[in-house]
Image: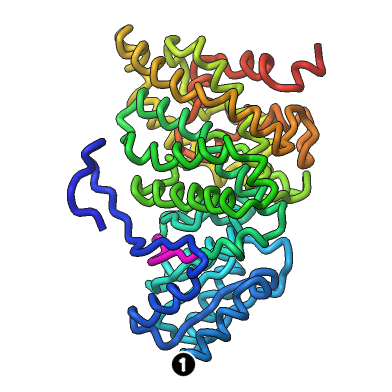
Amino acid sequence: MTTTPCPGCGLLHEVSTEQVVVARDARQQLGAYVDAKGWRRLLVVADANTAEALGDELAADLAAAGHEVATQRFAAREGLLADEDAVGAVRDALAAARPDGVLAVGSGVINDVTRYATFLEGQGYVCVPTAPSMDGYASSVAAMQFDGVKITLPTHAPLAVFADPAVLSAAPPEMIRWGFGDLIGKAAARFDWVLASGLSDEPFCEIVEARVLVPLTRCIEGVEELLAADEEAVVALTTGLIESGLAMAMMGNSRPASGCEHHASHFWDLLAYRGLREHAPHGLQVGYATRFATAVQRASLDRLGDPLLVPAGGGGGPEEQKWFGEQYLALGPVRDEKQMWFARYGDGWPGTPEKVADLARRLVSAASIFDRVGHALDLAGFPADAGYLGVDEVALRATFRYANRLRSRFTVLDLLESQLHLDDVLDEVLPVALAAS
């Protein structure tokens, strides 16, 4: 754990993850780690797929090595949610097994559920990925879905991460694509982070930024090898996803890896919960949203120096409320936080011409990767029009008009809404405008 201020931003980046291994001998190193910790009783959490991919074999190996191993195996092969029921099942397993340590063997939902349950119980855990499908392996936050609304909760990071490239490369090809979609979304998240730090006193760290940007750039340049499950490319993707999680842990929140593109994905999750579309994998949603998010961000550059005229995240009219249904009232605290943000910083923008010019320079730099992002999305099969993943033209427009209601985090959507430009920009960049022309 870091005890000295970061030379880049002056913050203390406290990361509790002790070891990260992405190597062919990851399982052997995991065994050595468990022995070094003195863990005798273990709980392995997996679902039906990840148990078959690795969890059952890993549990057997640990039992043969003299450990007492209990398992929490979710029966679902698809559709498992990081919700109250799943968390309750892991907490019950913890109470029954009373383990010294917990192994989360799986991908997104398994890790979020295990992370949150062990956090509530004050129990350390180790992450054992089975697919390079999402960015939360080393994160200190958990993406949960409570009452249909995706929320990101502060928890704790895993004590260690052990990933075997052979297992990762053997994952279903679509899961590799999910991970690519989640990673490429960091390009949009980076823009929003730069934007918010320039408009407020939100911390920004170039050292943390680089931990995400370097592997992101590498994967964008090697997308064809990645989609062919080339092991070296899969290792690069996994490393990037893990680095994203570490970046989040370093900042104490998901800002380095999540912006309006993730808010769009959360909006689609809510629509699925309400029965308005089918659930889709998080990484596919983020990748699809990234194309439109970056288009909106580019359009914002021409309007950057305009003042903030009205509080962002407001509204509340019938058109807005119909998209959220009964969950709308539960989002009141988000709206309140947006109003407080605006009250604190709204009158300070645009400020001096020098301040605007400096932020514009930083944002142009952040946007310089967008052409390569678009090309990589093309190669990976993410479309540039409406209709993908059950998101029609009307829903696509509503997504980027109202997704900022789901998080108190300031993004380009809030900037444009507060400037009264958001509707015009959506008319400019979204396919619904093309269809109407």
The quadrant of the rendering that contains the C terminus is top right
Element under label 1?
Answer: loop
Find out whether residue 26 is within the magenta segment.
no
Give the residue displayed 32% in from the left and 56% down from the top: 15
Q: Is residue 267 visible?
A: no
The percent coordinates of residue 357 (x first, y second) are 36, 11
Q: Which residue is under mark 1? A: 66
Tell me the colour scheme of the image: rainbow
Relative height, residue 266 to residue 347 (above, below): below
The one nearer the camera, 216 or 152, is 216
Q: Is 325 left, or right, of 255 in this rendering?
A: right
Choose top left, top right, bottom left or bottom right for residue 51.
bottom right
Q: Is 246 left, or right, of 293 in this rendering?
A: left
Q: Is 81 left, or right, of 115 in this rendering?
A: right
Choose top left, top right, bottom left or bottom right for residue 52.
bottom right
Give the residue displayed 47% in from the left and 64% down from the top: 115
The percent coordinates of residue 141 (x first, y second) are 45, 54
Residue type indicated by callout 1: Gly
The one nearer the camera, 227 or 38, is 227
Give the residue displayed 30% in from the left and 9% down from the top: 354
What span is in magenta?
Answer: 157-162
Q: Residue furthest left?
A: 4
